Image (cartoon, grey):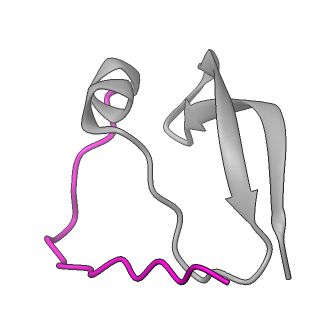
């Protein structure tokens, strides 16, 4: 597992013609993706529910 930097496009599946390009850090071992709220709002993506997460950083 590791981290990779990528430039990618995000879009709302209900409006696929509107794409916002972002620089992202991808963790190959995660289940959930995290995107800033302001980007999702620009795309018109509405939340389905709210969840809490705790980030753990391990220094080797």
Give the tally of numbered discs. 0
Above or below 38: residue 51: below
Say which quadrant the N terminus sits in: bottom right
In the rendered image, residue 34, in percent from the top left (x then y), is placed at: 45, 56
50 part of magenta stretch: yes
Is 54 positioned to the left or the right of 3 in the image? Answer: left
Q: Quadrant of residue 7?
A: top right
In the displayed structure image, the side of residue 59 where residue 1 appears, left or right: right
Query: Is 25 placed above or below 32 here?
Result: above
What residue is shown at x 47% (from left), y 77% (from top)? 57
Relative to 33, 28 lies left or right: right
Along the viewing direction, whichever of 56 and 33 lies nearer the viewer: 56
Assess whether residue 36 is covered by the magenta stretch. Answer: no
Q: Is residue 60 left or right of residue 4?
A: left
Q: Is residue 35 above or below residue 55?
A: above
User: Measured from the top left, where is residue 5 in percent x and y?
Assistant: 81, 42
Residue 47 screen position, x and y as percent: 21, 55
Toward the viewer: 39 or 44? 39
Residue closer to the observer: 24 or 41: 24
In the rendered image, the quadrant that contains the C terminus is: bottom right
- Tell me: residue 39, above or below residue 12: above
Quadrant position of residue 23: top right
Q: Residue at x 35, y 39 (%)?
A: 36
In-front residue for pair 52/46 = 52
Task: Identify the magenta region.
Answer: 44-60
Please identify the dominant SS of the magenta region: loop
Q: Identify the residue at horizontal 77%, vertical 32% (top origin).
A: 8
Q: Position of residue 42 (x, y in %)?
A: 33, 18
């Amino acid at each position: 597992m590791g981290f990779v930097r990528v430039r990618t496009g995000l879009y709302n599946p209900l409006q696929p013609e509107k794409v916002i390009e972002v620089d992202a850090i991808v963790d190959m071992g995660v289940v959930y993706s995290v995107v800033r709220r302001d980007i999702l709002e620009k795309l018109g993506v509405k939340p389905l529910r709210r969840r809490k997460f705790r980030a753990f950083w391990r220094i080797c």
